Amino acid sequence: MVRTRFAPSPTGQLHLGNLRIAVFNHLFARHHGGAFVIRVEDTDRDRNVPGSLEAILEDLAWAGLHWDEGPDREGPFGPYRQSERADRHRAVAMGLLAGGRAYRCFCSDERLATLREEGEGGAPGVGCPGGCQVGDAAEAERRVLAGEAAAIRFPVPDARIEFHDAVRGSVSFHGGDVGDFVILRADGRPTYNFAVVVDDIDMEITHVIRGAGHLSNTPKQVLLFDALAAPRPVFAHLPMVLGADRKKLSKREGASGIGELRAEGYPPDAVVNYLSLLGWSPGDDREVLTREELESELTLDRVGASDAVFDPEKLRWMSAQHLALLSLQELVQALEPFLDRARFPMEGEELLRSVEAIRTRLHTLGEVNDTLAILHPGPAVLESGVREVREEGAEARRIVGGVRAALAALSSWEADVLGQAVRDAGKEVGARGPSLFHPVRLALCGTRSGPDLGLVLAALGRETTLERLQAAE
Ligand code: GLU
């Protein structure tokens, strides 16, 4: 049974970079019919931001990345908040200590900082930078009982540490570059690398899929899995996502919150699809994939190791592609919360036809009002359209009049007959191409070009169409 996890720290809002990690974990778990777990890494109390977890969960739910177990959904491996697992972390650290797999370190933070500044300590091989002895366990226990503060450190062998990464293949670090590391601080709090491993073991996580930034933590973590006699999970470190300048993604580019994308009306399926392509590809030139396709196709062997570049224009394009996949009914429903009803008091059939006319111009749901304004641009634009027709002279006005008369005589008001009716009317009055369409469009919407004319006429309806044409005659 595949089990993946997304492990956010509640220190702020979710941005595209970490949503991408959640996307891969979610899709991969679904691909294998496995479980997707949310674990909250909230042990750094000073950095926790109230309300942040709720906002993160809301964004994940918006993205459709539903989780099987998590802080708000009890499961067999809870609790899912790291802060509630502190007793367990301490017990496991004590177990390593008792088994001689870890040692007490009495160095104060100040002493370690001084050593670092002086360039001393941290020499390759066993031993804490301050020289605490691994072997002297009995002496160490006496000092602790006497009230001395001590952290618990994990000794790293002076040897190559090798592990397999599903994206990068074999990866190795030298123990001397890693150095003995703290697993439990003197105040009893576990460190990140330790808590993660204990929790991944307890939660039976089979695949650790995360950003390449965590690669340097992995040698520490594999040593802990081994020391705890637990099988190592499959590690997959996804490539970095860079900005267009190939530097770290800036706030302006895409490190901004998911809340902004939601507010702008990016469909969640488009966002998930876009993020899935930052590092993965389906193996052919398809780019627009439905969620079902992503779930059935996403595997780790198609994840590449080279950096991905975030392109906001591509995301906007992807958004338009996904809006185009919706049926008209679905699109109208998705647009409802974005519609400015005071500006466009439309309902039912009128709304449907209006959206049908403008839908190819929409990139995001939030653009609906500015796009509907193509059909209903307001009196100033309509008046300037009329003025332009007048300025073109009697011929233009005669054409508008001819078209109006032909449309008025129609017994049906459907997009396909309307477009043809305008062309037929053009033949009657001896006009075609721009000399026919420009005056008609100027009279209708105030501009010379626009969406398919038949769709525009269907959206405006008989009454409004005839009124606007008449005003320009
Ligand atoms: N909490 C870590 C982070 O936000 C994730 C840890 C992990 O995936 O191992 O980067």
Image (spheres, rainbow, N blue to C red):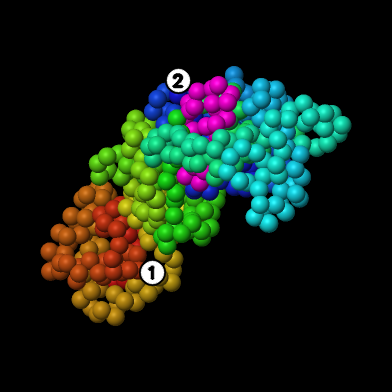
- The picture places residue 170, in percent across and down from the top left corner, at 40, 37
At mark 1, the secondary structure is: helix
- The picture places residue 460, in percent across and down from the top left corner, at 35, 55
Magenta segment range?
206-233
Q: Quadrant of the N terminus?
A: top left
Q: Residue at x 53, y 58 (%)?
A: 251
Whether 192 is drawn above or below 3: the answer is below
The residue under label 2 is 1
Would residue 383 be counted in the magenta stretch? no
Q: Can residue 89 be seen in this view?
A: no
Calculate the distance from the C-alpha at mark 1 to the C-alpha at mark 2.
Answer: 63 Å
Q: Residue at x 22, y 49 (%)?
A: 416
Would residue 230 be counted in the magenta stretch? yes
Q: Which residue is drawn at 38% across and 61% down?
A: 374
| Crowd tier of the residue under label 1, counting other residues whose Cα lies within 10 Å: few below 14, some 14–19, many 20 or above | many
Q: Residue at x 73, y 30 (%)?
A: 136
Label 1 amino acid? Answer: Leu
Whether 109 is drawn above or below 419: the answer is above
Tag of residue 17:
none
Q: Looking at the image, which is closer to me, 344 or 226?
A: 226
